[in-house]
Image (cartoon, coloured by chain):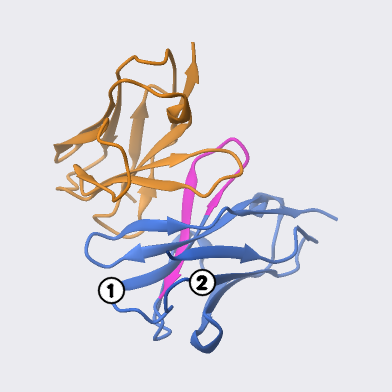
Amino acid sequence: QVQLQESGPGLVKPSQTLSLTCTVSGDSISSGGFYWNWIRQHPGKGLEWIGHIYSSGATSYNPSFKSRITMSVVTSESQFSLKLSSASAADTAVYYCARGVDLGDYHDVWGRGTQVTVSS
Amino acid sequence: DIQMTQSPSSLSASVGDSVTITCRSSRDIRIYLNWYQLKPGKAPKLLIYKVSNLQSGVPSRFSGSGSGTDFTLSISSLQLEDFATYYCQQSYSSPPTFGLGTKMEIK
């Protein structure tokens, strides 16, 4: 079955760029009808959708991140990535990657999440 | 953004009990309401999509209902593995938004 695995630095300094990668296994990242999401959870808080990307490279971002966010996809490596610039303590969270289903826009497969702390 | 309000924020229950969690949206989201289960250190799990559709592999003791702005997740005959935090999510309009969660603990 499809599995997702997040990877990246667990500690980022303030003002630097937070970079994460999600590796998809068990199915093609280019399978039709799906898209690829980043979602985060602040300590003790709810879930926040960051954005998504299709295998074509088309993206949609949460406006709350304004111009700080960039997502990309490398289909040959079954990976998609997140870059969040000008990181601050407010970006400290568990970051999840998840697969989105076009017909209904729900997230049917998630990674286990990776903790990212922004601190000097 | 559409605001999602869940209640209760926490509840205590025993194995074998039945529980209901409520989710209210700040405006009509038709049938675009999904439920997820989160446990520490585990991948979040989709339970129900589009109000009442049980995701493959999810036990039939989970069920969902509602429409418009008011929705419920019901769990009958609670099992030990059901003690977790549950989130509703609207996928009617972007950005998709989540409730703040309902943490279910063993009484």
Quadrant where the N terminus of chain A sits is: bottom left
Name the residue beneath numbered marker 2.
A24
Please tell me which residue lies in front, A53 or A25.
Answer: A25
Viewport quadrant of the C terminus of chain A: bottom right
Q: Are marks 1 and 2 in contact (CB under 8 Å)?
A: no
Disc 1 or disc 2, which is closer to the eye?
2
Badge 1 amino acid: Gly
Residue under the point 24% across and 55% down: B92
Chain coloured blue in this rendering: A
Which chain gets the orange colouring?
A: B
Q: Which SS class for mark 1?
A: loop
Residue at image position (26%, 39%) is: B25
Q: Name above or below for residue B68 compared with residue A15.
A: above
Residue A23 vertical position relative to residue A77 in the rendered view, above or below = above
Instruction: Residue A63: say if magenta.
Output: no
Q: Quadrant of residue A116?
A: bottom right
Specify the subunit that label 1 lies on: A
Name the chain under label 2: A
Residue at mark 1: A33
Going from N to C along the chain, the mark reached first, 1 or 2, is 2
Q: Quadrant of residue A52?
A: bottom left
Q: Position of residue B8 (x, y in %)?
A: 38, 21
Q: Residue at 36% of width from left, 57% of height from top? A: A108
Q: Is residue A50 magenta?
A: yes
Task: Look at the image and give the residue range highlighted in magenta.
Answer: A40-53
In this rendering, the answer to whether A103 lies above or below A53 is above
**Element type at mark 2:** strand
The answer to which of B99 and A66 lies nearer the viewer is B99
Please tell me the numbered disc located at residue A76.
none
**Residue B80: where, in percent of width, then height?**
46, 24
> At 29% across and 33% down in the image, what residue appears?
B23
Which class describes the residues within 10 Å of circle 1: few (<14), some (14-19), or many (20+)?
Answer: few
